[in-house]
Each structure stands twice: as structure tokens, then as C-alpha cells.
Amino acid sequence: MARWNMPVEPDELLYALKVGNAAALNQMPLKHTPGQGLEIVDEETGQVQTVHFADNAVNRFGVAIAREFDNMGSKFFSLMTRIGALMRLLEDDRAKPYVELEGGFTKIRNAMIEAERKAPSA
């Protein structure tokens, strides 16, 4: 049975962000490339469905994280919920002390990663 609010450690969240960023920037090979189809298996029925995503940075980011954490049940959902919340949080003026732009990249202080990993995912 899938769990939808799995705990996430700061190191897991940071690792997921690094994996996703590397895939988004085409800096790592992907086991699955968006555009070729991704098989999703319903654990209860065994039914297999193939989903196709466009090959863009956002989809490469998500697919890489899904593949990296595929053996951890719903850890992907918990990670992506926190990453989505983190992206919205970065736009808030109160987050500016914790965020630094360096070239075309955003550097996030560890305190923000720690706070986000404690956030509820549902």
C-alpha cells in the first residue's frame, strides 16, 4: 500500500535536487528519456500504463527523481511535494536571506532545506 506522507531527510531532499538538476541540465544519462514513454504499474491490479512526457528540463528533473527513488514506495511524492513548496517559497521576499543567485543558478542555504524537509507533504 502506498504511503503519501513519507518522512524525508535533509540529505535525501538535497540529493533529489542534485539528481533532478543534473538531469534537467543534461549533465547525466537518464535510464528513461522523456518522450519515449514511462511505464507506471498499479501495485494493486498489476495493470501497466505507458505515459509520455515532452522532453524538457522540468520533465527530465521529475523523471530522474522518480527513477532514483522508485524502490521507495511513495517517497517520490513526498520529495516532489516538498520541492514544489520550496520553489514557491523561494519567490517570497522573506526567503531572500536564505537564497543566493550565482550565475544562472540558485544556491539555497541548508536551513531552508531543513525547514522544507520538515514540512508536511499533504
Image: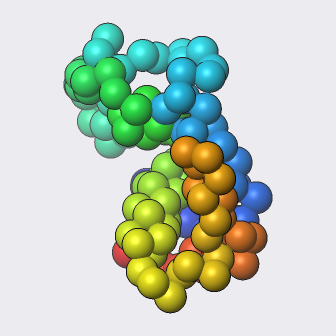
Q: Is residue 83 above or below residue 33?
A: below
Q: What residue is at 60 percent from the left and 59 percent from the top?
A: 101
* Residue at left offset 63%, top offset 20%: 28
- Tell me where residue 95 appears, x and y as whole percent: 54, 81
The image quadrant where one finds the N terminus is bottom left
- Residue 85, horizontal then vertical, whole percent: 42, 70
Q: Nearer the viewer, residue 70 or 100?
A: 100
Quadrant assignment for the C terminus: bottom left
Note whether 41 is above or below 93 in the view shown: above
Q: Is residue 78 left or right of residue 68?
A: left
Extreme-bottom residue of the structure: 94
- The answer to whether any part of residue 84 appears in the image is yes
**Residue ranking furthest to the front:** 103
**Residue appearing at x 50%, y 88% in the figure:** 94
Q: Residue 90 placed where, x, y %? A: 47, 71
Q: Quadrant of residue 34?
A: top left
Q: Quadrant of residue 117?
A: bottom right
Q: Residue 32 location in percent, x, y?
A: 46, 17
* 49 horizontally vs 10: left or right: left
Q: Is residue 111 left or right of residue 118?
A: right
Q: Please state which of residues 70 and 54 is positioned toward the viewer in this rendering.
A: 54
Asked whether, in this view, residue 119 is left or right of residue 38, the answer is right
The answer to whether residue 13 is visible is no
Q: Is residue 22 above or below residue 26?
A: below
